[in-house]
Image (cartoon, helix red, strand yellow):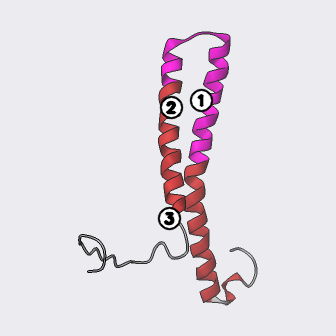
Amino acid sequence: MAEPGFWDSRESAMKTIAENKQVQAWLDPIRALESNLDNVNIAIELLESASDEELLNESSSSLSVIDLKLDRLEFIQMLSGPHDRNDAILTIRSGAGGQD
């Protein structure tokens, strides 16, 4: 965005900014998960040298939270196609089967 000529085409610049925001919205939670996982790895290294029940429980709960957040990110990623933000009309017609 700091490149010369970036703002020469307002439409192109706005498109690039929107794409950048989408990428950042995806990367920020991944970076947070990565940081949390690094903390758990450090805790595991500490547990290898000395047994600490509290640290073990904290690491276990942190891993559970990481797992839940990762599941959520995977679900969001499944719905991140170019047309997934669009509206849809869904019609359900009940019947006994066959041709109605």
Q: Residue at x 50, y 47 (%)?
A: 71
**What range of the chain is rendered magenta?**
31-58
- What residue is pinned by disc 2? 62
Q: Nearer the viewer, mark 3 or mark 1?
A: 3
- What residue is pinned by disc 1? 40
**Label 3 environment density (alpha carbons within 10 Å; few <14, some 14–19, many ≥20):** few
Rendered image quadrant of residue 97: bottom left
Q: Is residue 36 above or below residue 18?
A: above
Where is residue 47 drawn, in percent x and y?
A: 62, 16
Q: Amino acid at mark 1?
A: Val
Where disc 2 sits, the SS reads: helix
Q: Is residue 74 above or below residue 35?
A: below
- In the image, residue 35 lies in the stretch drawn in magenta: yes
Q: Amino acid at mark 2?
A: Ser
Where is residue 26 drawn, in percent x and y?
A: 57, 59
- Ranked by sequence position, the earlier of labels 2 and 1 is 1
Q: CA distance from mark 2 to mark 1?
A: 7 Å
Where disc 3 sits, the SS reads: loop
Q: Is residue 70 above or below residue 81?
A: above
Q: Residue at x 50, y 31 (%)?
A: 62
Q: Is residue 40 above or below residue 34?
A: above
Q: CA distance from mark 2 to mark 3?
A: 26 Å
Placement of the C terminus among the 4 image quadrants: bottom left
Q: Are marks 2 and 3 in contact (CB under 8 Å)?
A: no
Q: Residue at x 59, y 50 (%)?
A: 30
- What residue is pinned by disc 3? 79
**Label 1 environment density (alpha carbons within 10 Å; few <14, some 14–19, many ≥20):** many
